[in-house]
Image (cartoon, rainbow, N blue to C red):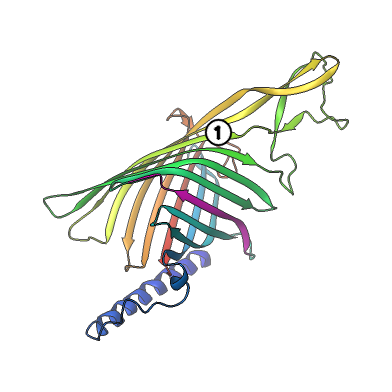
Amino acid sequence: MNFSKAILAVFAGVTLSSAAMAQDQAATAAQPAVSAEKTTGIKTLLPGAYANVQLRHYTDRQMDGNKVVNDTPTIETRPNIGTTLFNDKVDTSFLWAFQKKADTNSVTKAFEENITQIKIVDGKYGFIGPYFETLLGDGNFIESYDGIYGEGTYDLTLASGGKVSFGGWIESVGTFQAEHARDKDANKVEVKNKTGNSSFALTPEGDTKTAKRDPELTTLQALSVKYAPAMAPNLSVGTEVEYDRDWQPKYVAKEVDGDTRTELDGYANSAVVISKFLLTYKLSDAVSLTNSLRHYNKGFYEESINSDNANAFEGKNRWENRLILSATLL
């Protein structure tokens, strides 16, 4: 209960702050304008610089039939700074994520990452180009995602004055994973034994796993639609369907000239569909509040998710709710 009251208090505070800002802006509207050439701080050196912060409240609910197996609330803060370069053709940013779980009093750093996007094709309705992401997770766990990313939008104004926006994005990357400082098996996979030796092992300690030497391949794509009514232009409701497919390298051990060798044995693939129901309200030009209710499904609507992925709970069903307060700082 205290957990929820704290979140509501923060949201209420930001809302009041936004209203006060609006009053200040209205009071100073009649004052002489300041020259656009007068800029200070980082904008002087980097005109494309930007900064924002998000306060997120996650609730992950794992269901087994009508029974709640796990219901874990988490608060997360995400400060983000970045800049655009070369007429917005390059965008690079740095993000940090700090978490507090409901059953602890400590705040921990979940991860930090750098994302760089290069727009090779850039037009009125979207862009596409190379994408590079480096993630440093808890325990010095490093992953690199390199590939392509693109997105597009199309807005349609209705006769009623409302607006409908259609969108989509696609990401295709190879994931390169370094050794986890705390979990030495995080980057290892089980090796299929084709040596003919029933007591097969890769190490004297009996280990039958090997580190992934080949990248994990991932494609993600999504389609979305949202509606903003004319009577409430700051409010939008929408939905998005995301389809993710992942290819993990597999390895096999064979006996060659008396030596045990491991080699690539194809890829094991899996898929997840994420259905999202979105509600967004702009409190001001700089502050917005979004609620995202998500349902995860393993395969293409074949069965409920059952994954050992760090971002997904084991179980027959998974719902996640994300309440996000976003503020633009720069």
Q: Quadrant of the C terminus?
A: bottom left
The residue drawn where x is 47% and y is 68% is 5
Q: Quadrant of residue 242?
A: top left
Q: Residue furthest bottom?
A: 31
Q: Secondary structure at mark 1?
A: strand
* Relative depth, front residue between 233 and 131: 131
| Image coordinates for residue 123, horizontal then vertical, percent | 31, 47
> Which region shows up in magenta?
107-122
Q: Which three-letter amino acid code belongs to the residue tagged 1?
A: Leu
Residue that carries the numbered disc 1 in the rendered image: 217
The residue drawn where x is 80% and y is 15% is 256
* Relative depth, front residue between 232 and 141: 141
| Image coordinates for residue 250, horizontal then vertical, percent | 65, 26
Is 245 rendered above or below residue 237?
Answer: above
The residue drawn where x is 28% and y is 55% is 236
Q: Residues within 10 Å of mark 1 (few under 14, many from 20)?
A: many
Q: Is residue 259 magenta?
A: no
Q: Is 291 on the left-hand or right-hand side of 227?
A: right
| Image coordinates for residue 308, horizontal then vertical, percent | 61, 38
* Relative depth, front residue between 265 and 5: 265
Is 138 rendered above or below residue 304?
Answer: below
